[in-house]
Image (cartoon, rainbow, N blue to C red):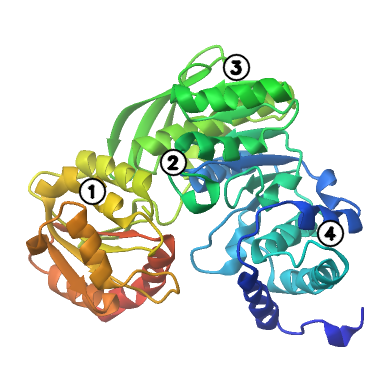
Amino acid sequence: MHAEEGFVEYTQALDWLHGLLRFGQRPGLERMQWVLEQLGHPERRIPFIHVAGTNGKGSTCAFLTQMLMEAGYSVGTFTSPYLVDFRERIRYNGSMIAEEDLLQLVNEVKVWVQRCEQETEFGSPTEFEVITLIAILYFSRVARPAVVVWETGLGGRLDSTNVVLPLVSVITNIGMDHTQVLGESLEEIAREKAGIIKPGVPVVTGEGRPELLAVFEERARQTKSTLYHIGEHFQAEQVQEQLGDQQFRYRSIHRREEASYRLTMNGIHQTTNAAVALMTIDVLRNYFSFLLEEEEISRGLQQTRWPGRLEVISPRPMVILDGAHNQEGMEALVSSLDRLLPDGVQLHLLFSGLADKPLAKMAESLVPVKSKIKKLHVTTFDFPRAAEANSLQESFLAGGWEREFLDAVPDWRAFLLSWMREKQSAKADDWLVVCGSLYFIAQVRAFFPTIVEEAGE
């Protein structure tokens, strides 16, 4: 390949990558398999932990990464979407892939993308497929971690990450998301996610509903895989919780006695995610001779932070970010707020979401905390799929909210600035929860340091 064909600048490489979005989501593994074949199957040289599920994938990956790193393992992590920088998606020991490494790998993969488009009937790989290929090359040739925590993009069966044969497969849970691609019922979605279960590879799941477990059990029988599910093979029970701290007890068939752990992340759902990560570690210790001491596990869990999940970005006035971007996410947020909100505190919500999400259903999920909510501010943000503030207002009306609760915010930045200025004085007992699309949360998070300066901290 001649040098002039490659990109010289990292930003050019990134623009080309994002330009592949025009190929949309095209389920199917044939493009991935064709390119990997040409590259001599680099994915076969890496041990993976493959994580699928509707919610909790990111947190579960974060717990796994942190525990393994505490025990001295070098860990690659592949996740999506990113919050601030595209390179967050590919990490080695917590650090993002270097711009020059990404540039070099884009140049290499670009050649294969063009050949796949020209020489096969499969067409061009999509943006996500190309990012997946880059991650495989980075982990197999550049960083060479001892293990890779590997998160699916969408679904499982036809997701481009499904070209690997992992040590363990993990399915956090099943919820209604991406129904246009994955199916209209929970069982159909479960079947898609169950597609990551491979012959003889153990599976750990945090899903407890019998009709969905039945789907996993059937797939595990076909593949002769052992399925470990919460409630039967391992249990987690929250002991106590306040903002920024919770404690839970954990039991598993792989351990003699139960253990107790602390998390700095809030929410019962994080107890479940942590338990799924713990069971995965138990399987790795038991069957793949991974060595993790109890205190390393404990430290790893306690040190795990996951931005944008009930994240306090200002203690006074209290501002919390939460990327609740589908119905289940909203329900988890509601149950957390219900438990964590002190008496006498008024709640304000600033919400923005994507137009293709079940917005009225999400609005409905918030109804249980209506008595604690003073105002619901809806806004739009700069993103192609973002819903307009007016249509959000309609969705909330359809979801059972009265007009007097709702407030359409034309400019969320101005809103946040004036909120911080006003509340820094007397009325510091109001809480503001910024929630909705992770893309929105990312923009708020990036904007926040400037607010604090301007408000005179």
Lateral position of residue 219 relative to residue 163, left or right: left
Estimate how packed mark 3 is, as few (under 14), some (14 to 19) or many (20 or more) residues with alpha carbons within 10 Å.
few
Residue 145: image x %, image y %?
Answer: 75, 48
Say what amino acid the circle numbered 1 marks.
Answer: Glu
Of the 4 image quadrants, the one containing the N terminus is bottom right
Q: CA distance from mark 3 to mark 1?
A: 41 Å
Where 188 falls versus 16 (above or below)? above
Q: Which residue is mark 1?
A: 364
The residue carrying mark 2 is: 175
User: Looking at the picture, which amino acid does disc 3 mark?
Assistant: His
* Kind of residue sitting beneath label 4: Val
Q: Position of residue 302 (x, y in %)?
A: 46, 40
Q: CA distance from mark 4 to mark 2?
A: 32 Å
Q: Nearer the viewer, mark 4 or mark 3?
A: 4
From where the camera sits, is residue 456 visible?
no
**Of residues 56 and 302, which is closer to you in this image?**
56
User: What residue do we see at 59% from left, 40% from top?
Assistant: 192
Q: Residue at x 65, y 61 (%)?
A: 128
Q: Secondary structure at mark 4?
A: helix
Marks 4/1: CA–CA distance: 45 Å
Mark closest to the chain's N terminus, 4 or 2:
4
Q: Decide: few, some or many residues near mark 2? Use Cα within 10 Å; few <14, some 14-19, many ≥20.
A: some
Of residue 250 and residue 156, the one placed in the foreground of this image is 156
Q: Name the residue beneath numbered marker 3.
A: 254
Q: Position of residue 95 (x, y in %)?
A: 62, 59
Label 2 sits on a secondary structure element that is loop
Residue pointed to by mark 4: 35
